[in-house]
Every structure is written in C-alpha cells, then in structure tokens.
Image (tube, rainbow, N blue to C red):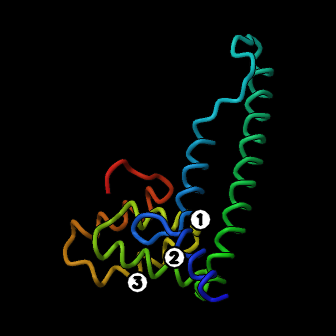
Amino acid sequence: SSSSSSSSSSSNVGLGGVPQCFTDYSNAIDAVEKLKIAGDDSSSRLEEQQQQGKVEAMMKQEVRNRCLASFWCEYTRYCRTVKTHMFQFPLRAALEAARDLHWNRAKLLLRPFPQLRALAILLAWDNTTNFTTKHALISNLWTNGADLDDGS
C-alpha cells in the first residue's frame, strides 16, 4: 500500500521537483488570459461592446475558478501523499528556488498562493547578497508574481 502511494506521488512530480499540478494550473491560467471569447467585434455601439466585455470577463473568471478548483484537488492529494503541509511546501520550495536564482520556479510555486509572496520576499531578503539580487527578488516575486518568463 505504501509503495503504491509513493509511486503515485512521484508520477505527479514534474521538472525541478515541482508537483505537476502547479505547472498544469499555470498553463491553464495563461491559456485563459490569451483566450478570446467568440463575439461580434464589429459592433458599433459602445454599450454592446461593453456588455460583451463584461460577459467575456465573467466567462474567463468562471474558467479560472474551475482551474483553481482542479489545482486544489490535485494539490491536496499530493500533500496527503507526501505528508507535507499545504503552505509549507510551496514556501520552502520557492525560497530554495529564489536562493538558487531560479525565478520561474519560485513564481510557479507561488502563483496559486499570492498571499505567500510577501512572506517569501521577507524570508529571502537576508539571504540576498547585493542590490541587484534584492531587486530581482522583488521584481520576480512581487511585481511580476503572476507572469512566468520563457527563461529562468
């Protein structure tokens, strides 16, 4: 029984030891942001365009909520399997990634937990050695906390 649970937890871990649900969530949210809900762009009335924009925003929010619900289902399963606290894992892993200057990994881990970004910056602050690294810490984990770059 324990061997089957450990094998299922290892199959859910992606690159860099990050659970696959973090990558799946981030990819889904990026796709939602790029999504253009079908509609009539040639509408000349401002009111119709505004209404269409509101409908699109509501539809995107519904998809974001479903993505988040799916993330929490998978992440809760992961935490139970590896016996880790749901907030301890992303915070520790993000701090390790920041220490190694792996900004994309840190942002990926904190994306579903925006409330932890400030704490991660505070805890990592004393481990940064110079102004350039401190600036990178803030710009990557706070200012652009939701955006993932192509590089790391």
Marks 2,1: beta carbons within 8 A: yes
Quick one: 86 or 15, which is closer to the camera? 15
Q: CA distance from mark 3 to mark 2?
A: 13 Å
At 57% from the left and 36% from the top, the residue drawn is: 34
* Vertical position of residue 78 compared to residue 145: above or below: below
Question: Mark on residue 90?
Answer: 2
At 54% from the left and 63% from the top, the residue drawn is: 20
- Give the side of residue 92 with respect to residue 59, left or right: left
- Give the side of residue 138 with respect to residue 146, left or right: left
Q: Quadrant of residue 74?
A: bottom right
* Vertical position of residue 66 compared to residue 93: above or below: above
Mark 3, secondary structure of its residue: helix
Q: Disc 2 marks which amino acid?
A: Pro
Q: Disc 1 marks which amino acid?
A: Pro
Q: Earlier in the sequence, mark 3 or mark 2?
A: 2
Q: Residues within 10 Å of mark 1 (few under 14, many from 20)?
A: some
- Give the side of residue 17 with respect to residue 6, left or right: left
Q: CA distance from mark 2 to mark 1?
A: 9 Å
Question: Mark on residue 112?
Answer: 1
The x and y percentages for residue 104 are: 39, 60
Q: Disc 3 marks which amino acid?
A: Leu
Quick one: 53 or 10, which is closer to the camera? 10
Q: CA distance from mark 1 to mark 3?
A: 19 Å
Q: Quadrant of residue 6?
A: bottom right
The x and y percentages for residue 97 are: 36, 72
The x and y percentages for residue 72 are: 69, 68
Marks 1,3: beta carbons within 8 A: no
Quadrant (top left/top right/bottom left/bottom right) for the C terminus: bottom left
Which residue is label 3 attached to?
Answer: 123
